[in-house]
Structure formats: C-alpha cells, structure tokens
C-alpha cells in the first residue's frame, strides 16, 4: 500500500482556560482533540463526523496548520508540517487548502470576489497580473460562476454562490488536498445538492483528495470513501462508509445513524429509536474510562474503569468499545 498523502499520529490540540484579574493563569485546558490518528490517500475522501463540540473542526484547522498540535504529528507526504518554515511552509499551503463552513464570514466584505479569489496567488507570488486574472477566471468558471462577475462584492451573491466563490479560492492554487469544514451546513437543502455535485465533479476531474468535516451523515454517504467517528476529541469508530453504515460497532455511531431524518415512516419504525441520555461531558474534565459511558445504553462496570483502545485492522475497520455491537 502506498504511503498516505496526509496523515496524523497521536494529535492533541488543546486550548487554555485562564482566570485571574491582573494576572491570567492557566487553571485548566480544553482537550479539543485528544490522540487522533488518520490517513488520507491521494484521490480519496475521508469524512470525520460527530456532534458539535467533538473536535472535528479543530482537527481540520490542525491539518492545514492554522493550529499547531500540542503533541503528535501531522505529516504531508511523510514530512511533519509543524517544522515547516518559510518557502517550505508556503509550498505546503499551496498543496493543502481549505473550504470554510460559513461562506459569508470567510469572505472579506470590502473585497471584490475577483480580489478574494486572486489573493492566494498574490500571497504566493504566482504568475504576473495577466496570468493571475486568467487563473481566477478559470477557477470561477470551473465552479459554475460567470468570470465577468469578478468585480462584484460578496453581498451581491446568494449563499450557494458565495460557497462556490470559497471553493474557487481553494482551487486557484491547484492543490492536491482540500479540507472541507462543513461545506454545505449553512446552505438550503436544494443548494446543498448542487454544491455536493460540484465537489464530486471536481474530485473526479482534478484528482483531488478531501477531508470532509460533517455532522450530516447523508452528506457523508454521498461523498466519502471512508469515515471516522469522533466523540469528545477521540475517534471511536472507523471504516469504509459501507462498513460503518451497514453494521456500526460503537453505540455512539449507531445513535448518530438512528438520528438521521427519514421520510418513510415504515422505515423509521423498522429502524427503531436509539435515544442518548444526558449531555456531552465537558472536554475540560472528561469522564474516566470510556468517555461515552455516561450516555451509553450498553455500558457496564468496566466501561467506567478502563479506557478502550481504538484497534484498527488491515481493512481499516476499527472501534474503541469494550462491548461492541454485533459481536
């Protein structure tokens, strides 16, 4: 098997909690990402899913080095990105780009969209002005926008069009990996389908690899090849989309799948309900043992005592559970 294009090993990312009037002292730490591993091969889509607050967006920002891990390693083509500086860091940022969740918040309202899409080319000094304008026009056209609209401002576009602008900005550097942080969650359902079709076409035509951050499991099923399920900063299950959706082994994964809206009442009755009790524990002070055990319907005494290890087999299938479903 070829080496992964992008990988993470034991990644931990935390944020300090400080208190004090005159002198702010760190009294605790939010453990947003706590020992996460992942591998992304060229041309594939890996989805990272979980409830809000599970750490998936923090992980996404670590993968593009907007955040630097406290521990662990994130590597691109086998090289740790934490040590990159200067020209090497710039080269990495041309290869790994990002689409943000909120298209209006990610665009400068004072800049025309042509300027926003061209800005990465300006920062990296790629081409002369004529070449940059040509690449901007190509990027806009590729995402389904009229290049003549480059002189307009973000507020003159719809939400779906603004997300297309964000995609064009991520594409203009001709990257190999795009990290998509909830790329359709802020859009209407009808527009979501258009953006998903666009992302699928771009991956096929350009050979892109995606890390897809999502909480909508239907979106994941549409786009992803493999999926990793996160809970409270850790990966609790992984595998291909077909494996995980057909036979979830972790109770949390089963609860996420059962929460998907289904239009057919008969299918809902056949599926049954899996209600989770209680709230997500605080990432400042996670529970001992399995972090999911306070809400788990199948938890036993050892779940509160022993921390389960995510053991991943050669087929990529793995789960962190003392009492997995179906086995």
Image (tube, rainbow, N blue to C red):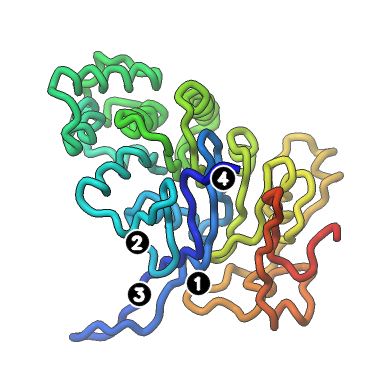
State the residue lying farthest toward the left: 129
Query: Label 3: which residue?
Result: 16
Q: Earlier in the sequence, mark 4 or mark 1?
A: 4
Q: Quadrant of residue 152?
A: top left
User: Where does label 2 land, which residue?
Assistant: 68
- Horizontally, residue 322 falls left or right of residue 139, namely right
Reading the chain from its start, which is encountered first: label 2 or label 4? 4
Mark 4–mark 1 Cα distance, whole angstroms, equals 22 Å
Residue for point 13% across, 22% down:
129
For marks 1 and 2 on the same chain, the one whose residue lies earlier in the sequence: 2
Above/below status of 150 relative to 296: above
Query: What residue would you read off at disc 1?
Result: 283
Q: Can you see residue 162?
A: no
Quadrant where the N terminus is found in the figure:
top right
* Along the viewing direction, whichever of 282 and 213 lies nearer the viewer: 213
Q: Which residue is mark 4?
A: 47
Front-most of residues 47 and 166: 47
Q: Quadrant of residue 254?
A: bottom right
Q: Secondary structure at mark 1?
A: loop
Residue 263 visible from this viewpoint? yes
Work out how far the residue at label 1 is from the one at label 2, CA to CA, in angstroms.
19 Å
């Amino acid at each position: 098997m070829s080496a992964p294009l992008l990988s993470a090993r034991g990644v931990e990312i935390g944020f300090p909690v400080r208190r004090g009037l005159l002198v702010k002292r760190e009294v605790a730490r939010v453990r947003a990402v706590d020992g996460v591993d992942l591998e992304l091969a060229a041309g594939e889509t890996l989805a990272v899913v979980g409830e809000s607050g599970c750490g998936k967006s923090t992980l996404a920002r670590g993968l593009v080095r907007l955040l630097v891990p406290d521990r662990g390693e994130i590597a691109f083509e086998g090289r740790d990105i934490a040590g990159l500086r200067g020209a090497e860091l710039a080269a990495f940022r041309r290869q790994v780009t990002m689409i943000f969740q909120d298209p209006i918040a990610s665009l400068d309202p004072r800049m025309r969209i042509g300027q926003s899409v061209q800005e990465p080319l300006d920062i990296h000094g790629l081409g002369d002005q004529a070449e940059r304008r040509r690449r901007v026009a190509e990027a806009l056209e590729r995402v389904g926008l009229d290049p003549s609209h480059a002189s307009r401002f973000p507020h003159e576009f719809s939400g779906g069009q603004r997300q297309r602008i964000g995609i064009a900005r991520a594409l203009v550097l001709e990257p190999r990996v795009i990290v998509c942080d909830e790329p359709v969650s802020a859009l209407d359902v009808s527009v979501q389908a258009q953006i998903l079709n666009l992302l699928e076409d771009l991956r096929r035509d350009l050979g892109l690899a995606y890390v897809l951050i999502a909480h909508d499991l239907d979106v994941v099923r549409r786009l992803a090849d493999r999926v990793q399920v996160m809970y409270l900063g850790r990966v609790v299950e992984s595998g291909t989309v077909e494996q995980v959706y057909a036979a979830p082994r972790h109770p949390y994964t089963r609860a996420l799948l059962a929460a998907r809206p289904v239009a057919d009442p008969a299918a809902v009755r056949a599926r049954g309900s899996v209600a989770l009790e209680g709230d997500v524990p605080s990432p400042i002070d996670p529970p001992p043992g399995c972090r999911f055990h306070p809400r788990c319907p199948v938890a036993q005494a050892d779940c509160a005592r022993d921390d389960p290890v995510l053991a991943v087999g050669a087929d990529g299938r793995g789960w962190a559970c003392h009492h997995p479903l179906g086995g």
